[in-house]
Structure formats: C-alpha cells, structure tokens
Image: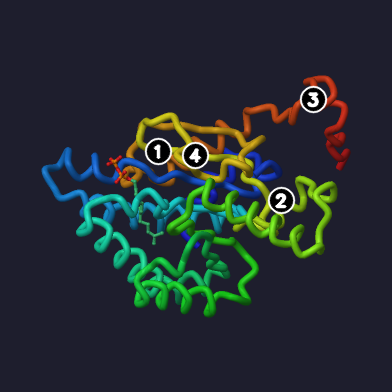
Amino acid sequence: MDSYPEEYTRRLDMRRIPRHVAVIMDGNGRWARSRMRERTEGHAEGVNSVNRITRLASDLGIKYLTLYAFSTENWLRPAGEVETLMHLIGWTIRKETPELKANNVHIRLLGEIDRLPPEVAGCLAHGVEETRGCDGLNLCLCLSYSSRWEITEAARKLAALAAEGQLKPEDISEETMSSHLATRGIPDPDLLIRTGGEQRISNFLLWQIAYSELYFTHVLWPDFDHEEFVKALEDYQHRERRFGKTSDQVRDDSPEPADN
Ligand code: FPP
C-alpha cells in the first residue's frame, strides 16, 4: 500500500468514515477548454481522477462509491463527444478490471445499460462478472442513468404488480419504492460531492439523497485529487446528522465512547 493512507487516517476519524459516497464528476470540459484542448481530453483526464479516488475510497474502507459517469441527458451532447466518452468508459473498465479485482472492488452498473453501444456494454459486463465475488468497495457506475427515469420505472413496475393483483396500493411503503429502484440493496449516500462549481443535483439519486450531506467544490473533476477528497471527508465529519431530530436527541442517541 502507498504511504498516503497513513497521513489521511491520522487526519480523519476512521470510526466515522461514510459508508456511501456519491459523486457528480463535473468540470472535464472546462478543464480542457482552459488549456485550449478538446473537451474529450478533459474526460480522458477525468479517468485519472476516477482511478485515484476509487483507490483511496477502497483504502479508507468506504463501502460504496457511486459515480455519475453518464446521465440520460448526456445522450443529447454532440455525437462525437458521446462516442468518445462511451469508448473511454468501456476501455477504462476493461483495462482496470484486473487491478480492481486485486483490490477486492465489486463493479456494479446502474442505468439503462442496454442503450450503450454493445462493445462498451460487453466491457462493462466483463468487469461486473470478473469482480462478482469481491466484497470490498462497491464501485457503482451510473450510466445512461437519471433519477426521474429510475423513479418512473419503479412506478411502472409497482403499477403492473397492482394491476395483476399481486400488490395492494396501501401496501406500497418507502421500502417497497426503494426496493424497485436501480439502487435496490444499496444504502443511501451519506455524502454527495459535486465538483466543478455548480450547485445543483442534475437528476442524480433524488430519492436516495433525502438525508445525504451535500458538498460542493469549485475544483474541476480532473483536478480532484487525494487531498480534495480527504477535505470533503473532513468536512463531512464535522457535520451533525440529525435526520429531522434535534441536536439533543442526536447526542443522547449516540453511543458512549468505550472506556478502554
Ligand atoms: C461532466 O463534465 C462529466 C461527464 C459528463 C462525464 C464524466 C465521465 C468521466 C469522468 C469518465 C468516467 C469513467 C469511468 C471509467 C467511470 P462536463 O463535460 O459537463 O464538464 P463541463 O461542465 O466543464 O463542460
């Protein structure tokens, strides 16, 4: 293992590492344009950030890292950019799968994967299959994903079950809804990071982030390094998560530190 985790484990409270971190990776295009380069070069540089943040998340013991890699709305971008991005994602996963597997990382896919070019979907399916037995970090890649798509799909499935008489409308609960989303079985994010300076959610995990802590930074995704990630985690660790309760209640609920 590199020496970096030691410094970071000193700075962070390792008992309060978020279980699930979700990231809106924004700013690739601006990173490239400010260097007079093609937008797609910004995406290629963004892959380096994906690799280093995945590695650090895994080393810190984060259990779920969910990356917004391609939204439903991103299909509307110029065809050349879409094609390059798709192949970059497929090719990166193909190349990184052995190392991800060696680090016990389980690749998972969320979104309309059958809309992806078949060769890209093939690279991703190979990564998922290869890492199926891994039980360290879950790397959840959102591809052709949007929250409204996901919620609409869930509504459609529940309506079909109700129409078939397999589900009573009054039996639909928050748990039923959650279990029909693309994220079924995945705990809600504790921390949502957005890079690139915008302060919006852009159709990402709308149901799941009801009580997530939000962290916005001006740092562009290709510049988002270990230090920036640890700064986000430190910021998260200074938040008081109340889930609608009062401060006093939260303090009373938290377990006493052990004597030894
Ligand atoms: C948003 O920046 C970024 C994207 C739409 C793509 C993000 C994808 C990657 C970083 C590659 C992911 C790779 C893997 C293997 C998961 P933007 O283009 O909107 O930037 P801008 O706001 O500066 O124009």
Q: CA distance from mark 1 to mark 2?
A: 29 Å
Q: Position of residue 119 (x, y in %)?
A: 35, 77
Label at residue 177: 2
Q: Earlier in the sequence, mark 4 or mark 2?
A: 2
Proximity of marks 3 and 2: CB atoms separated by less than 8 Å: no
Task: Classify 10 Å Cα crowding around label 4: few (below 14), some (14-19), many (20 and above).
Answer: many
Name the foreground residue: 18 vs 198.
Answer: 198
Q: CA distance from mark 4 to mark 2?
A: 24 Å
Residue at 52% across / 64% down in the picture? 109
Q: CA distance from mark 3 to mark 2?
A: 24 Å
Q: State the SS at label 4.
A: strand
Tell me if residue 244 comes above or below residue 115 in the rendering.
Answer: above
Q: Is residue 217 left or right of residue 40?
A: right
Proximity of marks 1 and 4: CB atoms separated by less than 8 Å: yes
Quarter of the figure with residue 120: bottom left
Q: Position of residue 58 (x, y in %)?
A: 55, 58
Tag 4 residue:
193
Tell me if residue 260 comes above or below residue 247 in the rendering.
Answer: below
Q: Position of residue 211 (x, y in %)?
A: 66, 35
Q: Is residue 250 left or right of residue 38?
A: right
Tag 1 residue:
195
